[in-house]
Every structure is written in C-alpha cells, then in structure tokens.
Image (spheres, rainbow, N blue to C red):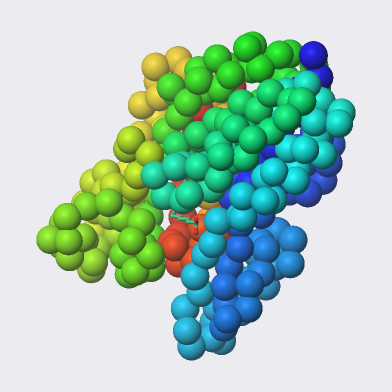
Amino acid sequence: MKTVVVTDSTSYIPKHIRENLNIHMIPLSVVINGETYREEVDLNVSDFYDAVKSIETLPTTTQPPIGEFEQLYSKLAEEYDAIISIHLSSGISGTYQGAVAAAEMAENVRVYTYDSEISCMAQGFYVLEAASMAQAGKTPEEIIPRLDELKAEMSAYFMVDDLSHLQRGGRLSSAQAVIGSLLNIKPLLHFQDKVIVPFEKIRTRKKAMKRIVDLLAEDVEKGKFLRATIIHANRVQEAADWKAELAVQFPTVDFSISYFGPVIGTHLGEGSMGMAWTIK
Ligand code: MYR
C-alpha cells in the first residue's frame, strides 16, 4: 500500500523538509489590506511580521477552500492508495472540517483525516512522524495509532505579548470576565479539548518561560525521552538563546526551533513564545 501525507501550512514545516519527506501542504491565507496571501506560498514569515508593522487595519485569516483539498486528493489518488491528512485543531479553524468534507467525496483513494487538536510544529511532529513512517512503507493502520501515542504525550504551552489579538479573533475560549482579568498579565495558555484556554495566570514573560521549563523538567524527570520545539513569533535570537540554555540543562531532549507563521501570528501577535514537546 502506498501512503502519502498531506498537511496544512500551519505545521510550518520548512519546504526542503516537506520535499524530502514527500509532504503535501495546503495553505491557509492571511488577508492584509484587502489582499489575500497564501502563507508559506505568497508570503513568508519575516515579510509578514514586517508588513504588520506598517499597516493600519489588522490582518484576518481564512481557511483553505474545500476545492483545494478535492484537487490535491484527486491528484494524489493517481499515485497513492491512502492519504493521511493532518490539520490544525478543529476547535480553532474550519480547515479540518474542509478536509473531512473533501475526503468524503474522494474517489479511488482512502483519505484518513487527522485532527491534530493543536497547530504549529506540535502538529508538525505528527506530520513528520507520519511521513517518515509512510516512506518506510507503513500503512495508515500502523501510522495512526503511533500518532495517537504522540498525541497522548503532547504538551504545549505558550504566552502572548498582547492578549487582544486572541480576543479579537475569538480564539480564546474563556468567559469574558476571565479574559478581562488576564489582559494586563502574561498568562500561560494551552489547548484543552481542541480549544485555547488559560493554563495559569503568570505576571511576567520571564516567569511564564520559567514555568514552561519547570513543566518540561517534570516530564524529563519521569524518564521520558522527548523531542521539544521552541516556537516564536519573530523572536529569532531569543529562541536561539533559550534553546542553547535548555540543551545544556536537558541533554536527553532533542530541541528544535520553529515559528508562529503568518496565520497563527495574526491571532497571537508578534513576540509570542511557546514550547511543545512529546515523546521521541
Ligand atoms: C482560520 O482562519 O481558519 C485560522 C484560524 C487560526 C487560529 C489560531 C489561533 C492560535 C493558535 C495557537 C497555536 C499554538 C500551538 C502551540
């Protein structure tokens, strides 16, 4: 059985890695000043953060049209027997539902849609694992349980510099009163049941980052062998410094650096920072 992996742009997997692992990507889009840009295709991450500095109207985002999924699935059906299509959490975007609708219409190929229940390189971990296994000839029946194992061990925490982006986009799932009480601090956020909720109220960025490290340490102390990714919104140097520090503190963990690209950056804002980890 020949299996191939599809994901959306919010995995933010660099192009050369996608090409090496035969990962097919469907982009979400950002609308800036009335112009629609497909992220990772028409607009890269650094141009996005440059552009938002100079515009008056804040950008918005859109999920891919269902037709994009239909076209890609039908092209892949010519060569493959199965497609594993892995997407950002259905609790924050309609992208996954689009994939499901197109999967139901697909002919001559079996499409397995997978709700990552998260996004960014945390989702990317599932995509990379699935693609490596598919290249090694594994079937969806072998790959999907492995993704579920990674999901069961996934932790991801992030903080934003300014909560108003998440509030404006309606992606923070909490009572207005709770959100109001968080506006002047740097709460740690995470995903619960596919949506973003506050994890803990923390006053400063430094303390929030320290708390993330403590949470990682708890898992390392349990003897888990982990891969972790630092995810940043245009904070390249800060992410590199953090990674260098953590690599010394946690020699058994494989660290990487990834980013909040245009679509996710629209909802989190520049300066956001987070970390995700799961088992190797
Ligand atoms: C759409 O328009 O359909 C896209 C909506 C994307 C919402 C993004 C909300 C923030 C996600 C944060 C992910 C952090 C992962 C560690």
Q: In the depicted view, which residue is nearer to us: 63 or 192?
A: 63
Q: Which residue is the extreme one toward the left? A: 177
Residue 152 at what x, y percent from top left?
43, 22
- Left or right: where does residue 218 sit relative to residue 245? left
Q: Is residue 12 above or below residue 249?
A: below
Q: Residue at coordinates 54% horizontally, 86% vertically from top-left?
A: 55
- Of residues 69 and 272, the one drawn nearer to the viewer in this rendering: 69
- Give the total number of marks visible in the rendering: 0
Q: Residue at coordinates 47% horizontally, 84% vertically from top-left?
A: 57
- At 23% across and 68% down in the image, what residue appears? 184
Location of residue 191 with respect to 238 vertically, above or below: above
Q: Residue at x 80, y 35 (%)?
A: 76
Quarter occupied by residue 109: top right
Percent of width and height locating residue 200: 23, 46
Quadrant of the drawing holding the N terminus: top right
Q: Note whether residue 186 is visible.
A: yes
Position of the C terminus, as image quadrant, is top right
Q: As drawn, is 4 to the left or to the right of 242?
A: right
Visible residue check, residue 240 = no
